[in-house]
């Protein structure tokens, strides 16, 4: 009987904790509520063609992080860089 009660308590806690306590993130940044501030910053940066993180200097941390996420997304990944000797130029003369 004790095992069944303990199991029921664990299940109840799991149902209560899981959906309400899960931390939401936006492009790696922690959200305080629904990530709407991050989305607003991202959308603003996209609309305005922001490419420099220093332009992400609003009054809201979540807005700034959303803007930063957009800027980071625009940067080429290290794997996208072409080595100098494979740049398509003919080095033979």
Image (spheres, helix red, strand yellow):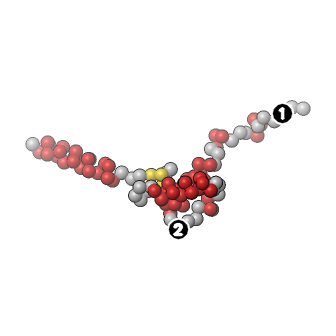
The image position of residue 79, as x and y in percent, is 64, 40
Q: Residue at x 84, y 34 (%)?
A: 91
For this orientation, the residue located farthest to the right is 93
Of 4 and 75, the residue lying toward us:
75
> Which dot marks residue 59?
2
Of 31 and 7, the residue lying toward us:
31
Vertical relation: 68 (above or below) 2: below
The image position of residue 59, as x and y in percent, is 53, 68
Q: Residue at x 68, y 41 (%)?
A: 81
- Pick the quarter of the image with the N terminus: top left
> Which dot marks residue 90?
1
Of 47 and 33, the residue lying toward us:
47
> Where on the picture, by quarter, is residue 47?
bottom right
- Pick the quarter of the image with the C terminus: top right
Question: Is there any visible trace of residue 30 in the rendered image?
Answer: no
The image position of residue 71, as x and y in percent, is 60, 53
Of 63 and 89, the residue lying toward us:
63
Q: Residue at x 48, y 59 (%)?
A: 37
Report whether 69 appears left or right of 20.
right
Q: Secondary structure at mark 2?
A: loop
Report whether 54 appears left or right of 31.
right
Nearest to viewer (mark 2 / mark 1): 2
Report whether 90 appears left or right of 68.
right
The image position of residue 20, as x and y in percent, is 32, 52
For this orientation, the residue located farthest to the left is 1
Q: Secondary structure at mark 1?
A: loop
Of mark 2 and mark 1, the one earlier in the sequence is 2
Crowd around label 2: few <14 · some 14–19 · many ≥20 (10 Å): few
Question: Is there any visible trace of residue 8 in the rendered image?
Answer: yes
């Amino acid at each position: 009987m004790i095992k069944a009660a303990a199991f029921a308590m664990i299940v109840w806690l799991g149902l209560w904790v899981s959906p309400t306590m899960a931390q939401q993130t936006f492009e790696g940044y922690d959200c305080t509520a629904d990530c709407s501030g991050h989305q607003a910053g991202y959308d603003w940066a996209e609309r305005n063609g922001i490419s420099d993180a220093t332009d992400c200097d609003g009054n809201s941390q979540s807005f700034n992080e959303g803007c930063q996420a957009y800027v980071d997304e625009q940067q080429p990944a290290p794997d996208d860089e072409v080595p100098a000797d494979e740049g398509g130029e003919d080095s033979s003369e």
